[in-house]
Image (spheres, coloured by chain):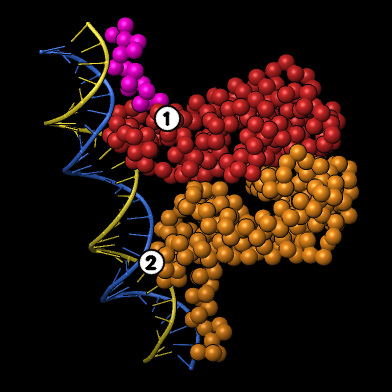
Chain colours: A orange, B red, C blue, D yellow
Amino acid sequence: MAAMSTGITSRADANRRRILDVALAELLRDPDASMDQIARAAGVVRRTVYGHFPSREALVGTLVDGAVESVAAAHAAGRDGVEDPAEAVARSVLAVWEVADRYRILVALAQRSVAMEGIRDRLTPVRQASVELLRQGLEAGVFDSPLPAPALAYVHEQTVIALMEAVNDGLLNAEEAGRSAAVTVLTAAGVPASVATELVAKLG
Amino acid sequence: MAAMSTGITSRADANRRRILDVALAELLRDPDASMDQIARAAGVVRRTVYGHFPSREALVGTLVDGAVESVAAAHAAGRDGVEDPAEAVARSVLAVWEVADRYRILVALAQRSVAMEGIRDRLTPVRQASVELLRQGLEAGVFDSPLPAPALAYVHEQTVIALMEAVNDGLLNAEEAGRSAAVTVLTAAGVPASVATELVAKLG
DNA sequence: CGTCCACTGCACAGCTCTGTGCAAATAGAG
DNA sequence: CTCTATTTGCACAGAGCTGTGCAGTGGACG
C-alpha cells in the first residue's frame, strides 16, 4: 500500500479532483446546485460523490477551505515585507487576483444566506489584515477617505468582486483587469489617479 | 362595493402590506426564506399569505417590482437636469441611498443564483443610464479611470452595496453614509478626493 | 342582530433533495 | 486471468417546501 503511485487510486483520485473542480464551477453558477447536478456535471453518479464526501456540507467545506487558504496566502504574500501601505494594498490586490478563480466560489457563497456566514468568519484574518493596512495608510495620510478603515475594507472587497464579474461578463480583459483593479482600489481610497497608475505600473 | 374606504378591506389591506414589509426583511436575511417563515414573521398563517399572493414567485415579484420602480425613479430624479457628470453621479447616489431599504432586497436576491437573473434585466435601464453618465464624464476628462464605463458602473454598484452592508453591520452611521458613498464613488472614478468632498458637501 | 369577508387550522398530494444500503458491473494491478 | 477497489444502478426512508381544498371562527358593517 505504498508503491501504488499510478494504480487504481489514480482513477479514484482523479475523480475526486474532478468532482471538486466541477463542483466549484457548478456552485458558482448556482449556489444551490444539488448533489445530483454536481455529480452529473462531473460525469459521475450521485452515489459516487457520496463515496468521496460524506455530505454536501463536507464537499462545500473542502472547497471553501481550499479557496480561503489560497486567498489568505496570496494576500499575505502580496504585502510581505512592503512598508508603504499604498504599495502593499496594490500588491495584495494583484496577488489575490491571481487566485481569483478559487475566490469566485467564495463570492458566490459568501454573499448568500445567513447559513453560509461561516465563510465570512474564516476570512476574518484576511479582512483584519486589510483593515490594519488601511488604517495605517489613513493615519499616514497616504489615503484620503471619509470612510473609517473597516468600511473602506468592505468597499475594496466589493470592488474586486465587481471587477471579477465584469471579467466574467466580458466587459474587461482578464489580464489587465488585475492592474485596473489595483488602481481602482487605490483611487477609491483617495490616492490620486496619476499616483495610483504610476505605482501599479511600476509593479507589473 | 364602492363606499368601503375603511371597512373590512382595511384589515385585509393592512395584512397585505405587512406581509410585503415583513417578507422584505425576511428575504433580506435569508433569500431562501419559506412562505411559512414569512407568514409566521408577519403574524399570520401560511394559508393567509396564499390568500393575497397566488405563489411565492408572485410575492417576490411584487416586492422586486416595487423596489426596482423606486430605485429607477430615485436614480432618474437625482440626475434630472444636471449637466455636470460628477454632480449627476453624486446626486443619483444620494437619491438611491434614500430608498436603500427597498434596494436591499434587490441586493440579496440579485446576487443569488441564476434563477433570479430577471432582476438584473429589469435594472438594465438604470445601469444603462449610469454607463452613459460615466462615459460622458470619462470623455470630458472629469473622471479618470483605467476602466471602461461599463466596468466602472459595476464598481459603483458594488460600492454602494458594500456601504449598505457596512451600515447593516454597524460600521457606519446611516445618515452620513449616503454622502460618504457619493464621495467614495466619485474618488473611485478618479475624481480627486478634495474635489469630490467639496462637491458632495455643496449638495447636502 | 345578521351578513359577509378575511383569517384560521388542518389535511393532502406532489415534488425535490439528502443520505444510506446493497448487489452487480467494471477496470486496472499483479 | 484473477483479485480488488471503485463505480454503478436502484431502491428506500426521511425531511422540507409548495400549492390547494374545505370547514370553522371572528370581527366589522349595515
Q: Is residue B3 magenta?
A: yes
Residue type for callout 2? Arg
Q: Is residue A86 above or below residue B51?
A: below
Q: CA distance from mark 2 to mark 1?
A: 41 Å
Residue B161 visible in the snapshot? no
| Image location (x, y in percent) of residue A128 | 68, 56
Towards the viewer: A15 or B75: B75
Location of residue A189 (image quadrant): top right
Contact (Cβ within 8 Å) of mark 2 with mark 1: no
Say which element carries label 2.
helix
What residue sits right under mark 1 in the picture?
B20
- From the viewer's perspective, is the residue at label 2 or at label 1 nearer? 1
Q: Is residue A57 left or right of residue B194?
A: left
Q: Crowdedness of circle 2 by 10 Å Cα count: few (<14), some, many (20+)? A: few
| Left or right of residue A111: residue C10 | left
Of B135 and B52, nearer the camera is B52
User: Relative to B17, is A169 above or below?
Assistant: below
Q: Please check whether the numbered discs 2 and 1 fall on a single chain.
A: no
Which residue is tagged 2? A47
Residue type for callout 1: Leu
Which subunit holds the residue at mark 1? Answer: B
Mark 1 crowd level (few <14, some 14–19, many ≥20, 10 Å Cα)? some
Side of C21 where B93 appears, left or right: right
Looking at the image, which residue is at 29% across and 17% down?
B8
Residue at the spot 78% in from the left edge and 23% down from the top edge: B202
Name the mark on residue A16: none
At a point 35% along the width and 10% down the height, the residue shown is B5
The image position of residue B100, as x and y in percent, is 58, 31
| Residue nearest the viewer, comparing B125 with B12 | B12
Residue extent of the magenta highlight:
B1-17
Which image quadrant: the C terminus of chain B?
Answer: top right
